[in-house]
Image (cartoon, helix red, strand yellow):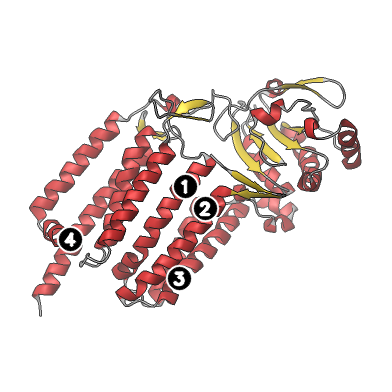
Amino acid sequence: MLPILQVGPLAIQMPGLILLAGVWIAVSLTDREAPRYSLKPSTLSNMILIGLVVGILSARLWYVIRFFDIYLDNPLSFFSLNPTTLAPLEGALTGLAVAAFYGYRKGLPLWPTLDALTPGLAAFGLTVGFAHLASGDAFGMETSVPWAIELWGAQRHPTQIYEVLAAGFIFWLIWEIRRKEKVAGFLFLIFVALTALSRLVVEAFRGDSIITYGSVRSAQLGSLLVLAVALIGMHLLARVQAQESKSP
Amino acid sequence: MHKLNSLAKSPIRWGAIIVGVVVLGVAWIGISQVPASATTSGSIPSPREGFAAPDFTLETLEDETFTLSDLRGKAVVVNLWASWCPPCRAEMPALQAAYEADRGRGLEIVAVDMTYQDSEADAQRFVEDFGLTFTVPLDRDGTVARQYLMRALPSTFFVGPDGVIRKVVIGGPMSEATIRSTVSEMLEEVP
Protein backbone atom coordinates (compact mmCIF):
# COMPACT_ATOMS: atom_id res chain seq x y z
CA MET A 1 0.00 0.00 0.00
CA LEU A 2 1.36 3.40 -1.00
CA PRO A 3 -1.61 5.78 -1.18
CA ILE A 4 0.43 8.97 -1.03
CA LEU A 5 3.92 9.62 -2.32
CA GLN A 6 5.53 12.54 -0.52
CA VAL A 7 7.90 14.38 -2.88
CA GLY A 8 9.23 17.33 -0.90
CA PRO A 9 6.19 19.50 -0.13
CA LEU A 10 4.00 17.67 -2.67
CA ALA A 11 1.63 14.90 -1.55
CA ILE A 12 0.97 12.91 -4.73
CA GLN A 13 -2.10 10.67 -4.64
CA MET A 14 -0.71 7.47 -6.12
CA PRO A 15 -3.98 5.73 -7.14
CA GLY A 16 -5.01 8.77 -9.18
CA LEU A 17 -1.58 9.02 -10.77
CA ILE A 18 -1.63 5.32 -11.71
CA LEU A 19 -5.11 5.63 -13.27
CA LEU A 20 -3.97 8.70 -15.20
CA ALA A 21 -1.03 6.67 -16.52
CA GLY A 22 -3.56 3.95 -17.42
CA VAL A 23 -5.61 6.38 -19.52
CA TRP A 24 -2.46 7.54 -21.30
CA ILE A 25 -1.36 3.96 -22.04
CA ALA A 26 -4.87 3.05 -23.23
CA VAL A 27 -5.04 6.04 -25.59
CA SER A 28 -1.59 5.36 -27.06
CA LEU A 29 -2.34 1.65 -27.57
CA THR A 30 -5.64 2.53 -29.26
CA ASP A 31 -3.79 4.98 -31.53
CA ARG A 32 -1.51 2.14 -32.60
CA GLU A 33 -4.30 -0.39 -33.11
CA ALA A 34 -6.74 1.85 -35.02
CA PRO A 35 -5.10 1.66 -38.51
CA ARG A 36 -5.33 -2.15 -38.43
CA TYR A 37 -9.12 -1.75 -38.42
CA SER A 38 -9.03 1.10 -41.00
CA LEU A 39 -10.10 3.57 -38.34
CA LYS A 40 -8.75 7.09 -37.92
CA PRO A 41 -6.69 7.20 -34.69
CA SER A 42 -7.67 10.82 -34.03
CA THR A 43 -11.41 10.00 -34.12
CA LEU A 44 -10.91 7.20 -31.58
CA SER A 45 -8.78 9.25 -29.20
CA ASN A 46 -11.23 12.15 -29.46
CA MET A 47 -14.01 9.75 -28.52
CA ILE A 48 -12.08 8.55 -25.45
CA LEU A 49 -11.23 12.09 -24.33
CA ILE A 50 -14.77 13.41 -24.89
CA GLY A 51 -16.13 10.48 -22.88
CA LEU A 52 -13.68 11.16 -20.03
CA VAL A 53 -14.25 14.92 -19.86
CA VAL A 54 -18.05 14.59 -20.07
CA GLY A 55 -17.92 11.75 -17.54
CA ILE A 56 -16.01 13.78 -14.95
CA LEU A 57 -18.02 16.98 -15.47
CA SER A 58 -21.35 15.21 -15.31
CA ALA A 59 -20.29 13.22 -12.21
CA ARG A 60 -19.76 16.61 -10.60
CA LEU A 61 -23.03 18.01 -11.94
CA TRP A 62 -25.09 15.01 -10.74
CA TYR A 63 -23.57 15.38 -7.26
CA VAL A 64 -24.44 19.09 -7.12
CA ILE A 65 -28.00 18.33 -8.25
CA ARG A 66 -28.30 15.78 -5.44
CA PHE A 67 -27.32 18.39 -2.83
CA PHE A 68 -28.78 21.36 -4.66
CA ASP A 69 -29.88 23.32 -1.53
CA ILE A 70 -26.38 23.32 -0.06
CA TYR A 71 -24.77 24.40 -3.34
CA LEU A 72 -27.40 27.10 -3.80
CA ASP A 73 -26.13 28.65 -0.54
CA ASN A 74 -22.52 28.48 -1.80
CA PRO A 75 -22.63 28.58 -5.61
CA LEU A 76 -18.85 29.04 -5.96
CA SER A 77 -18.31 25.69 -4.26
CA PHE A 78 -19.39 24.10 -7.52
CA PHE A 79 -15.81 24.67 -8.65
CA SER A 80 -14.19 23.34 -5.49
CA LEU A 81 -13.28 19.89 -6.73
CA ASN A 82 -12.78 16.91 -4.50
CA PRO A 83 -13.03 13.22 -5.46
CA THR A 84 -15.62 12.66 -2.73
CA THR A 85 -18.01 15.20 -4.22
CA LEU A 86 -18.60 13.24 -7.43
CA ALA A 87 -21.43 10.89 -8.40
CA PRO A 88 -19.27 8.22 -10.11
CA LEU A 89 -21.95 5.88 -11.50
CA GLU A 90 -24.11 8.60 -13.04
CA GLY A 91 -20.97 10.26 -14.43
CA ALA A 92 -19.67 7.05 -16.00
CA LEU A 93 -23.02 6.32 -17.66
CA THR A 94 -23.32 9.84 -19.03
CA GLY A 95 -19.71 9.77 -20.32
CA LEU A 96 -20.27 6.40 -22.01
CA ALA A 97 -23.51 7.53 -23.63
CA VAL A 98 -21.93 10.72 -24.98
CA ALA A 99 -18.85 8.83 -26.26
CA ALA A 100 -21.12 6.29 -27.98
CA PHE A 101 -23.17 9.08 -29.56
CA TYR A 102 -19.99 10.78 -30.80
CA GLY A 103 -18.78 7.50 -32.34
CA TYR A 104 -22.17 6.99 -33.98
CA ARG A 105 -22.19 10.50 -35.45
CA LYS A 106 -18.64 10.02 -36.78
CA GLY A 107 -19.76 6.79 -38.47
CA LEU A 108 -17.44 4.51 -36.49
CA PRO A 109 -18.35 0.84 -37.13
CA LEU A 110 -19.37 -0.72 -33.78
CA TRP A 111 -17.45 -4.01 -33.59
CA PRO A 112 -14.16 -2.98 -35.25
CA THR A 113 -14.13 0.09 -32.98
CA LEU A 114 -14.58 -2.05 -29.88
CA ASP A 115 -11.85 -4.43 -31.10
CA ALA A 116 -9.48 -1.50 -31.63
CA LEU A 117 -10.20 -0.28 -28.08
CA THR A 118 -9.67 -3.71 -26.51
CA PRO A 119 -5.85 -3.76 -25.96
CA GLY A 120 -6.14 -0.31 -24.38
CA LEU A 121 -9.02 -1.45 -22.16
CA ALA A 122 -7.03 -4.52 -21.09
CA ALA A 123 -4.04 -2.32 -20.20
CA PHE A 124 -6.32 0.03 -18.28
CA GLY A 125 -7.77 -2.96 -16.39
CA LEU A 126 -4.25 -3.80 -15.27
CA THR A 127 -3.65 -0.27 -13.98
CA VAL A 128 -6.94 -0.41 -12.03
CA GLY A 129 -5.46 -3.42 -10.21
CA PHE A 130 -2.30 -1.45 -9.42
CA ALA A 131 -4.39 1.52 -8.24
CA HIS A 132 -6.23 -0.80 -5.84
CA LEU A 133 -2.87 -2.10 -4.65
CA ALA A 134 -1.75 1.47 -3.91
CA SER A 135 -4.97 2.58 -2.18
CA GLY A 136 -5.85 -0.65 -0.35
CA ASP A 137 -9.34 -0.60 -1.91
CA ALA A 138 -11.04 -3.77 -3.19
CA PHE A 139 -9.57 -5.53 -0.16
CA GLY A 140 -9.89 -9.21 0.80
CA MET A 141 -11.67 -11.21 3.48
CA GLU A 142 -9.96 -12.13 6.70
CA THR A 143 -8.01 -15.34 6.29
CA SER A 144 -5.19 -17.42 7.76
CA VAL A 145 -3.58 -18.53 4.48
CA PRO A 146 0.23 -18.15 4.59
CA TRP A 147 0.20 -15.46 1.89
CA ALA A 148 -2.28 -13.26 3.78
CA ILE A 149 -1.40 -9.58 4.08
CA GLU A 150 -1.98 -7.23 7.03
CA LEU A 151 -4.45 -4.61 5.87
CA TRP A 152 -7.20 -2.54 7.54
CA GLY A 153 -6.76 -4.10 10.95
CA ALA A 154 -6.72 -7.78 9.93
CA GLN A 155 -4.87 -10.53 8.03
CA ARG A 156 -6.57 -10.58 4.65
CA HIS A 157 -6.54 -12.24 1.23
CA PRO A 158 -4.35 -10.06 -1.04
CA THR A 159 -7.23 -9.66 -3.52
CA GLN A 160 -5.51 -6.69 -5.16
CA ILE A 161 -2.65 -9.02 -6.13
CA TYR A 162 -5.07 -11.67 -7.44
CA GLU A 163 -6.67 -8.88 -9.47
CA VAL A 164 -3.33 -7.71 -10.91
CA LEU A 165 -2.34 -11.29 -11.81
CA ALA A 166 -5.67 -11.96 -13.56
CA ALA A 167 -5.61 -8.62 -15.40
CA GLY A 168 -1.97 -9.23 -16.38
CA PHE A 169 -2.86 -12.60 -17.85
CA ILE A 170 -5.85 -11.13 -19.72
CA PHE A 171 -3.69 -8.34 -21.16
CA TRP A 172 -1.02 -10.80 -22.26
CA LEU A 173 -3.61 -13.07 -23.93
CA ILE A 174 -5.37 -10.18 -25.71
CA TRP A 175 -1.96 -8.89 -26.88
CA GLU A 176 -1.06 -12.33 -28.27
CA ILE A 177 -4.31 -12.98 -30.17
CA ARG A 178 -5.11 -9.45 -31.33
CA ARG A 179 -3.71 -9.97 -34.85
CA LYS A 180 -5.12 -13.48 -35.31
CA GLU A 181 -8.78 -12.80 -34.58
CA LYS A 182 -10.79 -12.67 -37.81
CA VAL A 183 -14.39 -12.21 -36.62
CA ALA A 184 -15.17 -8.54 -35.91
CA GLY A 185 -16.07 -8.10 -32.24
CA PHE A 186 -14.52 -11.38 -31.05
CA LEU A 187 -11.47 -9.77 -29.49
CA PHE A 188 -13.66 -7.39 -27.49
CA LEU A 189 -16.10 -10.10 -26.37
CA ILE A 190 -13.22 -12.41 -25.35
CA PHE A 191 -11.87 -9.56 -23.23
CA VAL A 192 -15.30 -8.92 -21.67
CA ALA A 193 -15.83 -12.63 -20.96
CA LEU A 194 -12.39 -13.05 -19.35
CA THR A 195 -12.75 -9.89 -17.27
CA ALA A 196 -16.18 -11.02 -16.03
CA LEU A 197 -14.73 -14.47 -15.26
CA SER A 198 -11.87 -12.97 -13.27
CA ARG A 199 -14.28 -10.81 -11.25
CA LEU A 200 -16.51 -13.83 -10.64
CA VAL A 201 -13.54 -15.77 -9.25
CA VAL A 202 -11.74 -13.01 -7.30
CA GLU A 203 -14.94 -11.59 -5.78
CA ALA A 204 -15.19 -14.79 -3.70
CA PHE A 205 -12.16 -13.61 -1.67
CA ARG A 206 -13.21 -9.98 -1.28
CA GLY A 207 -13.99 -8.49 2.11
CA ASP A 208 -16.08 -5.58 0.84
CA SER A 209 -18.72 -7.39 -1.26
CA ILE A 210 -22.23 -6.05 -1.41
CA ILE A 211 -24.52 -8.93 -0.36
CA THR A 212 -27.95 -9.60 -1.84
CA TYR A 213 -30.50 -12.38 -1.25
CA GLY A 214 -29.14 -12.97 2.26
CA SER A 215 -25.67 -14.28 1.44
CA VAL A 216 -24.93 -13.88 -2.29
CA ARG A 217 -22.22 -11.49 -3.49
CA SER A 218 -24.05 -9.27 -5.96
CA ALA A 219 -20.95 -8.58 -8.10
CA GLN A 220 -20.76 -12.32 -8.83
CA LEU A 221 -24.32 -12.41 -10.14
CA GLY A 222 -23.54 -9.42 -12.34
CA SER A 223 -20.32 -10.92 -13.70
CA LEU A 224 -21.91 -14.30 -14.45
CA LEU A 225 -24.63 -12.52 -16.41
CA VAL A 226 -22.05 -10.48 -18.37
CA LEU A 227 -20.01 -13.64 -19.02
CA ALA A 228 -23.05 -15.51 -20.41
CA VAL A 229 -24.11 -12.56 -22.57
CA ALA A 230 -20.55 -12.23 -23.98
CA LEU A 231 -20.51 -15.94 -24.90
CA ILE A 232 -23.92 -15.72 -26.57
CA GLY A 233 -22.70 -12.62 -28.43
CA MET A 234 -19.69 -14.57 -29.74
CA HIS A 235 -22.01 -17.21 -31.14
CA LEU A 236 -24.16 -14.62 -32.91
CA LEU A 237 -21.12 -12.84 -34.37
CA ALA A 238 -19.60 -16.13 -35.58
CA ARG A 239 -22.85 -17.05 -37.37
CA VAL A 240 -23.17 -13.65 -39.01
CA GLN A 241 -19.59 -13.92 -40.24
CA ALA A 242 -20.20 -17.44 -41.61
CA GLN A 243 -23.27 -16.27 -43.52
CA GLU A 244 -21.42 -13.26 -44.92
CA SER A 245 -18.53 -15.38 -46.16
CA LYS A 246 -20.97 -17.82 -47.85
CA SER A 247 -22.92 -15.17 -49.76
CA PRO A 248 -20.84 -13.64 -52.57
CA MET B 1 -8.17 -18.80 -33.46
CA HIS B 2 -9.89 -20.41 -36.41
CA LYS B 3 -10.85 -23.25 -34.08
CA LEU B 4 -12.59 -20.88 -31.67
CA ASN B 5 -14.59 -19.35 -34.55
CA SER B 6 -15.92 -22.69 -35.77
CA LEU B 7 -16.63 -23.78 -32.20
CA ALA B 8 -18.57 -20.58 -31.49
CA LYS B 9 -20.52 -21.07 -34.74
CA SER B 10 -21.94 -24.44 -33.69
CA PRO B 11 -25.14 -23.91 -31.69
CA ILE B 12 -24.91 -27.31 -29.99
CA ARG B 13 -21.26 -27.34 -28.95
CA TRP B 14 -21.15 -23.61 -28.03
CA GLY B 15 -24.52 -23.95 -26.28
CA ALA B 16 -23.08 -26.80 -24.21
CA ILE B 17 -20.10 -24.63 -23.28
CA ILE B 18 -22.39 -21.78 -22.18
CA VAL B 19 -24.52 -24.13 -20.09
CA GLY B 20 -21.35 -25.59 -18.54
CA VAL B 21 -19.99 -22.13 -17.71
CA VAL B 22 -23.28 -21.05 -16.14
CA VAL B 23 -23.57 -24.25 -14.07
CA LEU B 24 -19.98 -23.91 -12.82
CA GLY B 25 -20.53 -20.19 -12.20
CA VAL B 26 -23.66 -20.79 -10.14
CA ALA B 27 -21.82 -23.50 -8.16
CA TRP B 28 -18.93 -21.10 -7.50
CA ILE B 29 -21.34 -18.37 -6.36
CA GLY B 30 -22.90 -20.97 -4.05
CA ILE B 31 -19.51 -21.94 -2.59
CA SER B 32 -18.47 -18.35 -2.02
CA GLN B 33 -21.62 -17.30 -0.18
CA VAL B 34 -21.06 -15.44 3.07
CA PRO B 35 -23.42 -13.97 5.64
CA ALA B 36 -23.79 -10.22 5.16
CA SER B 37 -22.09 -9.65 8.52
CA ALA B 38 -18.84 -11.26 7.28
CA THR B 39 -18.03 -8.55 4.79
CA THR B 40 -19.22 -5.49 6.68
CA SER B 41 -16.20 -4.72 8.77
CA GLY B 42 -17.86 -2.08 10.97
CA SER B 43 -16.57 -3.76 14.12
CA ILE B 44 -12.84 -3.55 13.27
CA PRO B 45 -11.26 -0.15 14.02
CA SER B 46 -9.41 1.15 10.98
CA PRO B 47 -9.25 4.58 9.36
CA ARG B 48 -11.27 3.69 6.31
CA GLU B 49 -14.82 3.80 4.93
CA GLY B 50 -17.00 1.06 6.41
CA PHE B 51 -14.80 0.46 9.46
CA ALA B 52 -15.19 1.62 13.06
CA ALA B 53 -13.48 4.95 13.72
CA PRO B 54 -10.46 4.19 15.98
CA ASP B 55 -11.31 5.47 19.45
CA PHE B 56 -9.05 7.84 21.41
CA THR B 57 -8.98 9.88 24.60
CA LEU B 58 -7.02 13.16 24.60
CA GLU B 59 -6.78 16.41 26.53
CA THR B 60 -8.30 19.43 24.81
CA LEU B 61 -7.03 23.01 24.59
CA GLU B 62 -9.37 23.81 27.51
CA ASP B 63 -7.67 21.10 29.64
CA GLU B 64 -10.71 18.85 29.49
CA THR B 65 -10.65 15.14 28.68
CA PHE B 66 -12.23 14.17 25.40
CA THR B 67 -13.18 10.64 24.23
CA LEU B 68 -14.36 10.11 20.67
CA SER B 69 -16.77 7.27 21.47
CA ASP B 70 -18.70 9.61 23.82
CA LEU B 71 -20.11 11.17 20.65
CA ARG B 72 -22.01 8.03 19.56
CA GLY B 73 -25.41 9.03 18.24
CA LYS B 74 -24.06 12.18 16.58
CA ALA B 75 -22.67 12.86 13.13
CA VAL B 76 -18.97 13.51 13.75
CA VAL B 77 -16.28 15.08 11.59
CA VAL B 78 -12.77 14.20 12.79
CA ASN B 79 -10.27 16.61 11.24
CA LEU B 80 -6.50 16.24 11.72
CA TRP B 81 -4.64 19.54 11.40
CA ALA B 82 -1.62 21.61 12.40
CA SER B 83 -1.25 25.38 12.63
CA TRP B 84 1.63 25.52 10.13
CA CYS B 85 -0.31 23.71 7.39
CA PRO B 86 -1.70 26.14 4.75
CA PRO B 87 -4.62 23.98 3.48
CA CYS B 88 -5.69 23.37 7.13
CA ARG B 89 -5.72 27.15 7.59
CA ALA B 90 -7.76 27.49 4.39
CA GLU B 91 -10.47 25.00 5.34
CA MET B 92 -10.96 25.91 9.04
CA PRO B 93 -13.49 28.72 8.30
CA ALA B 94 -15.52 26.20 6.24
CA LEU B 95 -15.51 23.72 9.14
CA GLN B 96 -16.62 26.47 11.55
CA ALA B 97 -19.39 27.55 9.13
CA ALA B 98 -20.62 23.96 8.69
CA TYR B 99 -20.57 23.53 12.49
CA GLU B 100 -22.67 26.63 13.00
CA ALA B 101 -25.11 25.58 10.26
CA ASP B 102 -25.67 21.96 11.34
CA ARG B 103 -24.81 21.86 15.03
CA GLY B 104 -28.49 22.00 15.95
CA ARG B 105 -29.13 18.86 13.88
CA GLY B 106 -26.51 16.80 15.70
CA LEU B 107 -23.19 17.65 14.03
CA GLU B 108 -20.01 17.55 16.10
CA ILE B 109 -16.60 18.62 14.83
CA VAL B 110 -13.44 17.29 16.44
CA ALA B 111 -10.35 19.07 15.15
CA VAL B 112 -7.36 17.13 16.49
CA ASP B 113 -4.22 19.27 16.52
CA MET B 114 -1.07 17.29 15.63
CA THR B 115 0.61 18.82 18.68
CA TYR B 116 3.62 16.47 18.45
CA GLN B 117 4.62 18.35 15.29
CA ASP B 118 3.07 21.71 16.25
CA SER B 119 3.26 23.96 19.31
CA GLU B 120 0.42 24.39 21.79
CA ALA B 121 0.88 28.17 21.75
CA ASP B 122 0.54 28.27 17.94
CA ALA B 123 -2.51 26.00 18.09
CA GLN B 124 -4.08 28.26 20.74
CA ARG B 125 -3.44 31.38 18.63
CA PHE B 126 -4.84 29.62 15.54
CA VAL B 127 -8.07 28.70 17.35
CA GLU B 128 -8.47 32.28 18.59
CA ASP B 129 -7.69 33.82 15.18
CA PHE B 130 -10.37 31.77 13.47
CA GLY B 131 -12.85 31.94 16.37
CA LEU B 132 -13.28 28.16 16.45
CA THR B 133 -15.98 26.97 18.83
CA PHE B 134 -15.71 23.19 18.41
CA THR B 135 -13.55 20.75 20.40
CA VAL B 136 -9.80 20.84 19.74
CA PRO B 137 -8.05 17.80 21.29
CA LEU B 138 -4.24 17.80 21.39
CA ASP B 139 -2.35 14.81 20.01
CA ARG B 140 0.85 15.30 22.04
CA ASP B 141 2.54 11.97 21.29
CA GLY B 142 1.24 11.14 17.80
CA THR B 143 -1.16 8.39 18.99
CA VAL B 144 -4.07 9.58 16.86
CA ALA B 145 -1.78 10.20 13.88
CA ARG B 146 -0.69 6.54 14.06
CA GLN B 147 -4.23 5.21 14.66
CA TYR B 148 -5.51 7.15 11.65
CA LEU B 149 -2.47 6.31 9.44
CA MET B 150 -1.97 10.05 8.96
CA ARG B 151 -0.05 10.68 5.74
CA ALA B 152 -1.06 14.18 4.75
CA LEU B 153 -2.57 17.22 6.48
CA PRO B 154 -5.38 17.94 6.67
CA SER B 155 -7.07 14.52 6.80
CA THR B 156 -10.79 14.36 7.51
CA PHE B 157 -12.91 11.41 8.61
CA PHE B 158 -16.71 11.56 8.51
CA VAL B 159 -18.09 9.28 11.23
CA GLY B 160 -21.76 8.24 11.37
CA PRO B 161 -23.88 8.08 14.55
CA ASP B 162 -23.02 4.34 14.81
CA GLY B 163 -19.28 5.11 15.00
CA VAL B 164 -18.60 3.76 11.51
CA ILE B 165 -16.56 5.87 9.07
CA ARG B 166 -18.62 6.99 6.08
CA LYS B 167 -16.07 8.95 4.11
CA VAL B 168 -12.39 9.85 4.20
CA VAL B 169 -10.95 12.98 2.64
CA ILE B 170 -7.15 13.12 2.50
CA GLY B 171 -5.80 16.59 1.79
CA GLY B 172 -7.68 19.82 1.41
CA PRO B 173 -8.92 22.43 1.62
CA MET B 174 -12.54 21.30 1.56
CA SER B 175 -15.23 23.84 0.82
CA GLU B 176 -18.20 24.38 3.11
CA ALA B 177 -20.47 22.72 0.53
CA THR B 178 -18.20 19.65 0.39
CA ILE B 179 -18.40 19.29 4.15
CA ARG B 180 -22.12 19.95 4.40
CA SER B 181 -23.15 17.68 1.51
CA THR B 182 -21.05 14.84 2.97
CA VAL B 183 -22.47 15.42 6.44
CA SER B 184 -26.08 15.76 5.31
CA GLU B 185 -26.60 12.02 4.76
CA MET B 186 -25.16 11.22 8.20
CA LEU B 187 -27.39 13.82 9.85
CA GLU B 188 -30.46 11.99 8.58
CA GLU B 189 -29.41 8.98 10.68
CA VAL B 190 -29.04 10.99 13.89
CA PRO B 191 -31.78 9.78 16.26
Image location (x, y in percent) of residue B61 = 86, 27
Q: Which chain carries label 3?
A: A
Image location (x, y in percent) of residue B19 = 16, 44
Disc 3: which residue: A45
Considering only vertical position in the picture, is A118 above or below A210?
A: below
Query: B185 and A226: which one is in front?
Result: A226
Tell whether label 2 touches label 1 (CB within 8 Å). Answer: yes
Residue A233 lies in quadrant: bottom left
The CA span between labels 2 and 4 is 33 Å
The CA span between labels 1 and 2 is 7 Å
Disc 4: which residue: B1
The CA span between labels 4 and 3 is 28 Å
Which residue of the protein is positioned furthest toward the front in this rendering? A8
- Mark 3 Cα within 10 Å, few/some/many (few <14, many 20+)? some
Q: Mark 4 lies on which chain?
A: B
The CA span between labels 4 and 1 is 30 Å
Disc 2: which residue: A18
